Amino acid sequence: MIVAANDQYKTVMKPLSYKKGETESILKAVVSGNFTGSPVVLFYHIRIVNEEVQSLKITG
């Protein structure tokens, strides 16, 4: 399903910055493609515990 969406909308994600925190790290990236609103800057809030992703929240 993700592959089909990426093929349809020709999405590309370019990382802009990464801030590692004690409990949460944030990846800032610009996502572009042939979709309404492109390009958009998104923030990926990642919580990793014992080398496993515990949560991922994406905000714009």
Image (spheres, rainbow, N blue to C red):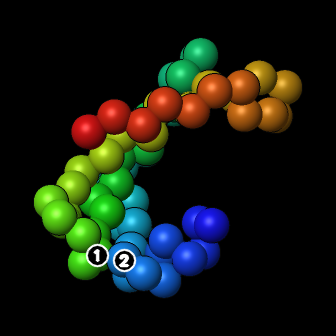
- Residue shown at 84%/26% (left/top)? 50
Q: Which amino acid is tagged 1?
A: Gly
- Residue shown at 48%/83% (left/top)? 7
Secondary-structure class at tag 2: helix
Q: Residues within 10 Å of mark 1 (few under 14, many from 20)?
A: some
* Numbered disc total: 2
Nearer to us in this view, 33 or 42: 33
Nearer to us in this view, 60 or 35: 35
Whether residue 18 is situated above or below residue 2 in the rendered picture: above
Q: Which residue is mark 2?
A: 9
Q: Residues within 10 Å of mark 2 (few under 14, many from 20)?
A: few
Give the quarter of the image for residue 12.
Answer: bottom left
Whether residue 6 is situated above or below residue 59 in the rendered picture: below
Q: Where is residue 38 shown, x and y percent of the image?
A: 18, 65
In the rendered structure, find residue 33 and report the number of the disc placed on it.
1
Q: Nearer the viewer, mark 2 or mark 1?
A: 2
Which residue is at the far top?
A: 23
Q: Where is residue 36 shown, x and y percent of the image?
A: 17, 64
Q: Where is residue 20 shown, x and y percent of the image?
A: 51, 32
In the rendered structure, find residue 21 and report the number of the disc placed on it.
none
Give the quarter of the image for residue 14.
Answer: bottom left
| In this rendering, position of residue 48 left or right of residue 6 | right
Q: Quarter holding the N terminus?
A: bottom right
Q: Which amino acid is tagged 2?
A: Tyr
- Residue shown at 49%/71% (left/top)? 5
Q: Are marks 2 and 1 in contact (CB under 8 Å)?
A: yes
Nearer to us in this view, 30 or 51: 30
